[in-house]
Image: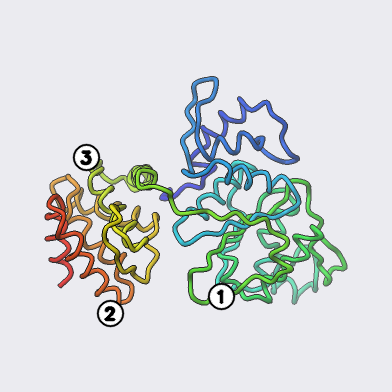
Amino acid sequence: MLRPHAEQAFADELAALARADDRPRPPSWQLSPWAVVTYLLGGALPDGTVISPKYVGPRRLMEVAVATLATDRALLLIGVPGTAKTWVSEHLAAAVSGKSTLLVQGTSGTAEEAIRYGWNYARLLAEGPSEAALVPSPIMTAMKAGSIARLEELTRIPSDVQDALITVLSEKTLPVPELGAEVQAAKGFNLIATANDRDRGVNELSSALRRRFNTVVLPLPAGEDEEVAIVTRRVEQLGAALELPAVPAAAEEVRRVVRVFRELRSGMTADGRTKLKSPSGTLSTAEAISVITNGLALAAHFGDGTLRAPDIAGAVLGAVIKDPVADSVVWTEYLEAVVRQRPDWSDFYRACREVHQ
């Protein structure tokens, strides 16, 4: 598979944690809250098994998130794009329920049926409303099974559709008036939603719905070294999944991309001496991972096997310049005022000037 689900890719780690986990588990949970946090943040088990970190950041945030799922409050993960909201929600669901695929992808076209239920219209016309004709949503399926459901990009869903969640989250029931019945959530059911408020077209949550969530804000990586570690780890994982040839000595280019993104994001050079204009895009950690992965593919298939500045210049340009007019000015000023002044970045300057004429 090109991209295995979390419970498939890390099945050995989850099994090792389950064997070593002797702490109390909430109803229907595969692991205890302590083991779930260990799975997310990494660690070593008594039998010598090493659990790889899935999230790099404050431990307390993950403890709050996991503790929330053990209560009757749903969990809302908020952050700017690229702060690992989807990644964290998938691994939380995999560790808690052993299944991360009960997913609703929120868009401006998401209908209420995606949250509640729909109908097999052929059977509905032939037989009328019946249990056999009903098509459960992932959320209804999770309620029946006592599992974790996931809802991506909650604020992209129209407000009237969002409100279909209120009864589910407050009463833990999902009425089916056509059948004169309702689905009551089994113990262990909960919902993880993700959202960001940086994109255009965001639908604000109603106060009634927001009260049903405990909100955890996922920040951008605090320091350069932390972000470099995140990018390096994910690039290695993606490279293995995509079967890209190993490219040695990529650390220098990873750090260079991370520094460029952090400086443009913050509007200040790393030494604090020069103020910069910021582009319209977010320049997230996820985009840095994409830039390096693209560079690795170029170096492996069209270069000499070593990741160099020309391999990443084009992808950096594409990540920075979202608005062809305003962002082009920002990038040109950054190249001339910052990159050109760094003697050890002369290769990067030349490569960027070549692709940005």
> In the picture shown, does residue 182 fall above or below 242?
below
Q: Secondary structure at mark 1?
A: loop
Judged left or right of residue 37, residue 53 is left
> In the picture shown, does residue 220 fall above or below 239?
below
Residue on which disc 2 sits = 325
Disc 1 versus disc 2: nearer the observer: 2
Assess disc 2: are there few (<14), some (14-19) or many (≥20) residues with their C-alpha within 10 Å of its C-alpha.
few
For the point 48% across and 42% down, the residue is: 54
Residue found farthest to the front: 273
User: 227 or 48, which is in the foreground?
Assistant: 227
> In the picture shown, does residue 147 fall above or below 122?
above
Residue found farthest to the bottom: 325
* Distance between mark 2 and mark 3 Cα atoms: 37 Å
Judged left or right of residue 285, residue 302 is left
* Distance between mark 1 and mark 3 Cα atoms: 43 Å
Q: Find residue 115 and report its image quarter.
A: bottom right
Quadrant of the frame with the C terminus: bottom left
Q: Position of residue 315 (x, y in %)?
A: 26, 61
Residue on which disc 3 sits = 248
Residue on which disc 1 sits = 108
